[in-house]
Image (cartoon, helix red, strand yellow):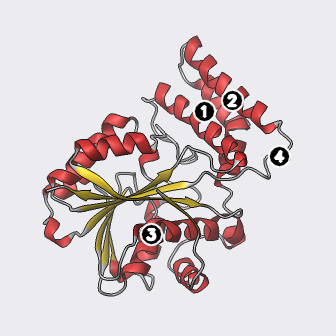
Amino acid sequence: MTATNVPDKGRDTLIESLLGSSLHNPALLDKFHIPRFKLRLAAIDAWGVKKGERLLDIGCGQGESSVALAAVVGDTGNVTAIDTAQMDYGHPFTMREAQQHIRNSALGPRISFYPVDAASFLTDTFVDNIDGAVLCQCLFYFPNESEVQNLFTTISNAGIARIYAAEWSYTPSHEPQVAHILATRAQALYHMYDAERPPDPRDQNVRSGVDQQAILRAAKLAGYRAAKETLVTPEQDMREGQFEVEYVLGPSFEQRVKNARLSQVQETEINDAIQELQTELEKPLYSGTTNVMAMDVWCAVFELQQ
């Protein structure tokens, strides 16, 4: 497995194009939007996506990964973006608002959005028009490893030759990343035990928190081999780790745990995870939450074995 930092060759110009095609809050450019686009572009670079590729972006959300992919594949490529979330889901912008903005943008002609799940879409679609499926940090939304396995099997049964996958690594390469890992684990426990609760637009993007070993198992069982694996270390301005930590330690998450109909054992396990995070943050290297680093992102290319 190779490791890399976020590349910067021609990046600023590309990010300006992505911002121009995306609905965003100008006040949050440096704090939120630009760091996320830099990380998306780093994953695409690690995968080796080429101009002209025709990609299926599964779990596209508001289209952040879709516009980044569209910029890279160029006019001769295209991105088909699918997601099952309700069109009024999302905060402060809904799925409907964000996707419509992209449709009307310079990159819009390269992207098609469909509110559908992968199994339904691939049943009715000719996969000869798809070079690869993209799973760009979307597996956090899946409730368990079994559902991830089902998705890989669906993609395999459709005959899609390549899968580009990216998820948080859960293995720290720098000590200040540990707090981010602990925060996501606390959330994963909550969503595992409160699985019947409908999603809240204000929730963070963590559900089961499947790691790379679970993804590798799912890929292998579906007939794919890992052709390439890369670790991307986010730049310091990527504050996702800090956001996750502050959310878990804040009143909103505390109240949701209290309101959930959990057993005493389950609630204790979540509170113990929160306490472990609080203990971690007492280390001098953190200075509160300002020095929390986002986890590395594990980027893999899977190829379907014949």
Q: CA distance from mark 1 to mark 4?
A: 21 Å
Give the mark nearest the N terminus, 2 or 3: 3
Q: CA distance from mark 3 to mark 4?
A: 31 Å
**Residue on which the image places disc 1:** 186
Give the mark nearest the N terminus, 3 or 4: 3
Q: Could you say whether the residue bearing mark 4 is in a helix, strand or loop?
A: loop
Give the mark nearest the N terminus, 1 or 4: 1
Q: CA distance from mark 1 to mark 3?
A: 29 Å
Is residue 119 at least partly visible in the picture?
Answer: no
Q: Amino acid at mark 2?
A: Ile
Residue nearest the viewer, comparing 1 with 183: 1
276 vs 109: above or below: above
Q: Could you say whether the residue bearing mark 3 is in a helix, strand or loop?
A: helix
Question: What's the residue at 35%, 78% (across, down)?
Answer: 50
Q: Residues within 10 Å of mark 3 (few under 14, many from 20)?
A: many
Q: Amino acid at mark 1?
A: Ala
Question: What's the residue at 46%, 37% (across, down)?
Answer: 208
Q: Nearer the viewer, mark 2 or mark 3?
A: 3
Q: CA distance from mark 4 to mark 2?
A: 19 Å
**Residue on which the image places disc 4:** 285
Q: Amino acid at mark 4?
A: Leu
**Residue on which the image places disc 3:** 44
Q: Amino acid at mark 3?
A: Ile
Q: Could you say whether the residue bearing mark 1 is in a helix, strand or loop?
A: helix
